[in-house]
Amino acid sequence: MPAGEFALEYVTGAVSMIIGDGIVIHVTNDSQVEAITQLIIYQNTGAGAMIKSDTGLYPLVPTWMGGSGYTIQESGEYWVRIWSTSEFVIPQVSFDRLSEPGLNPRPPFTPFVMYEPGGFAVFELQPHRRRRL
């Protein structure tokens, strides 16, 4: 399915990440029909953005969730794009920092930037890409 067949695009801003940090994407399908998504993580470079992780087509059955995660291998600026065939997909992205060792029972990662529903730049892709307000 080419990007032109998706209905919506959710985009985060760029976040500074260091080696060992993580990015976690969750998407929930809050409808009674299957939704197709594609979850892409980018790293900014001097020559544009480079794809670091791409789920390809990612089907979500009704009322279910899925996601993807990525551990940073190279410090830099990272951002996320989520494509969806349905307006009923609810996205969430966390940019996580590895916690200091020995601080148990803290989780190994602590979110330091969160994109929750309503926090994304949202674009309608049909018939042309335009910002949804």
Image (spheres, helix red, strand yellow):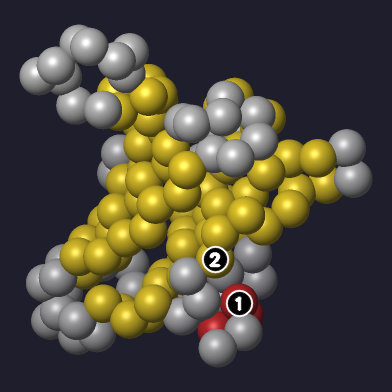
Picture coordinates of residue 19, whole percent (x, y): 56, 29
- The residue under the point 29% across, 54% down is 26
How many marks do you count on the picture? 2
List the residue tagged with mark 2.
Answer: 54
Residue 107's place in the image compared with 120, above or below, is above
Type of the residue with mark 1:
Ala
> In the displayed structure, does residue 105 sit left or right of residue 21?
left
List the residue tagged with mark 1.
Answer: 3
Picture coordinates of residue 10, whole percent (x, y): 47, 54
Sequence-first disc among 2 and 1: 1
Picture coordinates of residue 131, whole percent (x, y): 57, 52
Crowd rating for badge 2 (residues with CA inside 10 Å; few <14, some 14–19, many 20+): some
Figure quadrant of the N terminus: bottom right
Q: In this view, which residue lies farthest toward the right?
A: 47
- Mark pair 2, 1: CA separation: 13 Å
Front tag of 2 and 1: 2
Q: Quadrant of residue 3?
A: bottom right
Q: Quadrant of residue 64?
A: bottom left
- The residue under the point 74% across, 53% down is 50
> In the displayed structure, does residue 114 sit left or right of residue 48?
left
Of residues 26 and 128, the one drawn nearer to the viewer in this rendering: 26
Residue 91's place in the image compared with 22, above or below, is below
Of residues 61 and 55, the one drawn nearer to the viewer in this rendering: 55
Picture coordinates of residue 47, whole percent (x, y): 90, 45
Q: Is residue 15 visible?
A: no
SS of the residue under disc 2: strand
Residue 61's place in the image compared with 108, above or below, is below
- The residue under the point 68% across, 30% down is 76
